[in-house]
Amino acid sequence: MTRTRKTLSLIVLAIAALAALVYANRLLVLQYSLGWLTDIRHPREAYRPVAWMAGPPAADAPPAARPPNIIVIVADDMGYNDVSTHGGGYAAHGAGTPHIDSIARDGVIFERGYAGAAVCTISRAALLSGRYPWRFGVEFTPTPGALARVAPLLYDDPARLRPALVDQDKAAASKAFNELGMPGSEITLAELLRDRGYHTIHIGKWHLGGTPEHPEMRPNAQGFAESLYMESGLYLPQDSPDVVNARQDFDPVDRFLWPNMRFGVSYNNGSWFEPDKYLTDYFTDEAVAAIRANRNRPFFLYLAHWGVHTPLQASKADYDAVTGIPDHRRRVYAAMVRSVDRSVGRVLQTLREQGLDENTIVVFTSDNGAPGYIGLPEVNQPYRGWKLTQFEGGLRVPYMARWPGRIRAGSRYAAPMSNIDILPTIVAAAGGEPPKDRIIDGVNLLPFLAPDGPVQPERALFWRDGPYQAVQSGGWKLIVSGKPRRNWLFHLQQDPTEKTDLAASQPQRVAQLQALLAAHGKDLPAPLWPSFLQMPIAIDKTLDQPESPDDEYAYWYN
């Protein structure tokens, strides 16, 4: 009996010691949990080629007699100043953007082109639906469940003047990342083009939900006949000899991404497999192959790159080509910009080789401004703010399009436009109409792009993230912050870089714009999922810069 008691005591002590060890290392356990679960649930197979569905071997009509092909290329987190068309970028160091620039040169640059939101999911939902996503409950950013659980610890930094605020109950109850997304009841650009006889192809990032339990949110259920789906977020395995990594240890999210992201894609909801090269180049190869396979029928290609989103990983070839940048992080980032521009160039070259150049609409943009959490202060210049903020740096993005013979080369579109305008414009170009059973917030820009067309009428544009909102109307912009409780008012026609806050001196203008926000927000549905994280974002500093009590800041709601 004594021996049994001793054995039981030892077992209890061992369990207690193990529990204490797990608790002491709970941050490490939680931080790695998503990656471990991914490896168990989705073992990755070796590379296999994608057999793209082929169109007819010969065309019924020449390209010029068919509806226009449509290619929408979306970069991820690419800042306004990353594109050399805007006078910035890294051209002097071998990382200019001549191919992206050529779209503006041969077509139109939208001088006041705005993302649909300052963060990816909401912005992409706006582009594909033509609607403000909060009309259908997509207002907050889906967040991986593991990050939800680890967020209270990752952001537990008493040294920061403005701590992140985590609702631990909501975080603990948060659904899995892919259970949150755009409802299948929305009618997407792909569905509308499919119904007009287009072959529809998605390549790359989705970020709009979709699990085996919720297949209605996946691309194949949202109008895409084919989907080469980015399942995780590495550009190459971290230890690949062909990659150069740059970690941001000052960024809690970056610390979470490295152990949890994997190198994997799937095709049409199949099993995961590894690409055969650096992710941006791989997606480009497949886009080229898809264009060639469909050269004899109208197609819509949504090429949604992961570049230049974190984790920052450059191909070694691009890193070696970008010389003269002593800062390692900046050099990796510039090399990533270079790879996205090369992708655009290869897509344009393929159109020329296939005889499709004259009858293909190509749109290039970014889903939102570049983030401050990568620690590069120049990425959104000359604008203030970052991704996750309602300032111009978070919302103003590179935006350009070409359609030879229909859009005059070298055009400059001065009126504000946004992601919500892409669906009605492209559907009109394809000879169709947007749905009539719901509010479509965007407008067809084609009449205003005509050489002798009218000027786009004045309209308000809105952005919404819980109590953190913005409206632009008549050349004025109001930003309303829930935390801190504050308004910013800017006269963008005179102050496009938002240097002078006029809220105190223009109370009537503030009231007028607040009324627009209130009217826009009336009768909106509740968000489909709650926010559990409120994160402070300094408007004029990158995350690695020390805080000051007089910094201007706003809280972003995930």
Image (cartoon, rainbow, N blue to C red):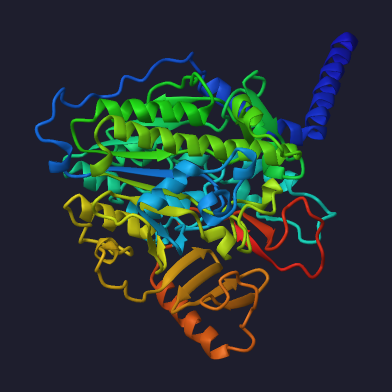
Q: Can residue 237 be seen in this view?
A: yes
Quarter of the image where one finds residue 38:
top right
Left or right: residue 220 compared with residue 204: left
Q: Nearer the viewer, residue 369 or 170?
A: 369
Left or right: residue 280 compared with residue 244: left
Q: Nearer the viewer, residue 397 or 516?
A: 397
Q: Nearer the viewer, residue 382 or 34?
A: 382
Q: Nearer the viewer, residue 255 or 414?
A: 414
Of the 4 image quadrants, the one containing the C terminus is bottom right
Give the image location of residue 515, x and y in percent.
46, 82
Give the image location of residue 199, x and y in percent.
23, 35
Give the image location of residue 194, x and y in percent.
21, 41
Rendered view: 550 above or below 543: below
Quarter of the image where one finds residue 130:
bottom left
Residue sitting at 59 percent across and 55 percent down? 387
Rendered view: 235 above or below 348: above
Of the 4 image quadrants, the one containing the N terminus is top right
Left or right: residue 284 compared with residue 543: left
Rendered view: 482 above or below 240: below
Residue sitting at 53 percent across and 49 percent down? 83
Counting every numbered tag in the picture gives: 0
Q: Is residue 181 visible?
A: no
Give the image location of residue 297, x and y in percent.
18, 34
